[in-house]
């Protein structure tokens, strides 16, 4: 797959593609860390967003968690605030957002020397403003 380019990748429903930030190679006191000793960062930039959905029924209510792995039981159980115009059927992030995600969430995908993460919407913990 030598012609594979990150710009050609479109995540499937409920997933985002994130480029993790580079791991710090030096501590705040100036100690240089070996590459294999550093932890992977838990934050990065969203490069692509899959379609939202997969958890909502035709009337916009959340379907039970068991079938789709998201939301709660019914309308209003997914934590979305209809008063603010939010919908449980919308993606929680957009391209360019800086996000913090679960430490063990996602799947690694490498193109050339760069490693990317495919994350489920629910693996994203926060958007950095």
Image: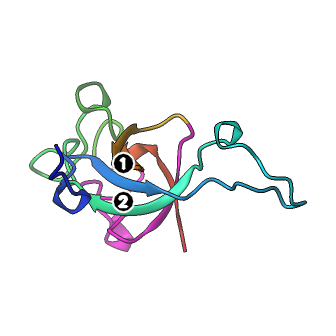
Q: Residue at x 19, y 42 (%)?
A: 54
Q: How many marks?
A: 2
Residue 16 image offset from top left, x and y in percent: 32, 52
Q: Residue at x 31, y 32 (%)?
A: 69
Question: Are discs 2 and 1 less than 8 Å apart at CB?
Answer: yes
Magenta extent:
79-103
Mark 1 lies on residue: 121
Q: Residue at x 31, y 71 (%)?
A: 85
Q: Residue at x 20, y 49 (%)?
A: 53
Of callouts 2 and 1, the N-terminal one:
2
**Which quadrant of the structure image shows residue 64?**
top left
Q: CA distance from mark 2 to mark 1?
A: 7 Å
**31 or 74, nearer to the observer:** 31
Main secondary structure along the magenta-highlighted residues = loop
Residue 51 lies, with reference to residue 54, above or below; the image says: below
Residue 108 image offset from top left, x and y in percent: 40, 38
Which mark, residue 92?
A: 2
Residue 17 image offset from top left, x and y in percent: 33, 53
Is-magenta flag for residue 4? no
**Residue 90 visible within the image:** no
């Amino acid at each position: 797959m030598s012609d594979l380019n990150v710009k050609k990748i479109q995540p499937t429903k409920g997933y985002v593609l994130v480029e993790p930030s580079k791991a710090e190679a030096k501590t705040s006191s100036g100690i240089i860390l070996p590459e294999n000793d550093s932890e992977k960062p838990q934050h990065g930039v969203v490069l692509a967003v899959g379609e939202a959905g997969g958890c909502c029924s035709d009337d916009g209510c959340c379907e039970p968690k068991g079938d789709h792995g998201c939301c709660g039981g019914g309308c209003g159980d997914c934590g979305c605030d209809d008063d603010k115009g939010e919908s449980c059927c919308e993606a929680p992030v957009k391209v360019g957002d800086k996000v913090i995600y679960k430490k063990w969430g996602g799947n690694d995908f490498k193109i050339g020397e760069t490693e990317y993460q495919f994350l489920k919407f629910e693996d994203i913990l926060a958007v950095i403003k």
